[in-house]
Image (cartoon, rainbow, N blue to C red):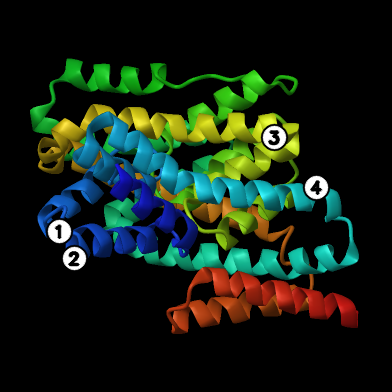
Amino acid sequence: MRELTSLFLRLGFTAFGGPAAHIAMMRTEVVDKRKWLSEQQFLDLVGASNLIPGPSSTEVAHHIGYLRGGWKGMLLAGACFILPATLIVLAIAMFYERFNQLPAVAGLLYGIKPVVIAIILHALWILGRVAIKNVWLVTLAAFVLALYFLGFNEILLLLGSGILVMVVRNFRKLSGSNIYSIGTLGISALPVLAAQPFSLAALFLTFLKIGAVMYGSGYVLLAFLRADFVERLGWLTDTQLLDAVAIGQFTPGPLFTTATFIGYLLAGVPGAVVATVGIFLPSFIVVAATNPWISRMRESALASAFLDGVNAAAIALMAAVTWLLSGSSIIDAPTLVLALAAALILFRYKINSAWLVLGGAVAGLLISLVG
């Protein structure tokens, strides 16, 4: 338990760069250095984390903790990985709420936002090359993109895409009644949260829903956050959402701590706690339930096909929301130049996105001072 605490607290304070970087750091620590797992065992954990909803790198931490110390080890590893980023984001949220109208802070955010758009576009390109493997998935992604702009629910699009690919690839294995029951289960399982006044209970349930159904990269979180908090509930603006994502980029640990920032903006410290618990709670439950079945999940044709469909839809949702948010971040020639420069650097060199965000902040501050 002391080893788990030490390792994941350190990773929580130093794991910059997104889920892929987090997983690479964990592999170095638990496979190469400590020999806790073999290479194949670690790959199985990563594959299992990709087959379930939630933040993949955080779920890998949960799995490692579970294997080392049962459910107590899982809780300890997960909490130690999440807590440092949560506290850092909470401190930044307090500063943001108090000083975000100052010219210097406005300048920082002015430079950060177009860089964040470039970072998301880069992630979209990298993930898309892996997730969209053939013409059939390209067509599915384009269809999902069109349906999103027509107003279809993003959860329906994700689950529907996964079920469609699973059924098409495994048609002979599934009887008509099984296909019907799978489709009905996917639709009936969707939580319906109508527009309502702000409350801590509604905040918790909204983040609980997101944590329970969100597949794909942490950037897909943008689609869910915008659909719920900007469009449906009207509790946030696009500008506040971009600021929240920028903070998540700049801090270590899981991008899901964006929830901490949003919760604080809406209801102070209680809101931050409720939002953070809500979005991360499902990952603990799902990992505890699936860990004993990892080897079977890895070999399942149904699970593999479902994941392919969900990933293709997730890429389409990322593209749609990036397009919508770019309108409030790339607003003039300097921000366009910043976005293009950041994209060029990302595509040409392997650089940690946190450094790009810092560079955007400095550039934005200098532009605002000159202007």
Q: Which mark is residue 54?
A: none
Question: How many angstroms separate mark 1 from mark 3 (CA)?
Answer: 40 Å
Specify the quadrant of the image occupied by residue 276. Answer: top right
Which badge, 4 or 2, comes first in the chain's sequence?
A: 2
Which badge, 1 or 3, comes first in the chain's sequence?
A: 1
Q: Which mark is residue 35?
A: 1
Q: Nearer the viewer, residue 7 or 56?
A: 7
Q: Amino acid at mark 2?
A: Asp
Question: Residue beneath label 4, please?
Answer: 97
Question: How many angstroms separate mark 4 from mark 3 (CA)?
Answer: 12 Å
Question: Residue beneath label 2, please?
Answer: 32
The answer to whether the residues at label 1 and label 2 have Cβ atoms under 8 Å apart is yes
Quadrant location of the N terminus in the rendered image: top left
Which of the two marks, 4 or 2, is nearer to us in this view? 2
Which badge, 1 or 4, comes first in the chain's sequence?
A: 1
How many other residues sit within 10 Å of disc 1, few (<14), some (14-19) or many (≥20)? few
Residue 160 visible in the displayed image = no
Identify the residue at horizontal 61%, vertical 53% (top origin): 245
The answer to whether the residues at label 1 and label 4 have Cβ atoms under 8 Å apart is no
Quadrant location of the C terminus in the rendered image: bottom right
Q: Secondary structure at mark 4?
A: helix
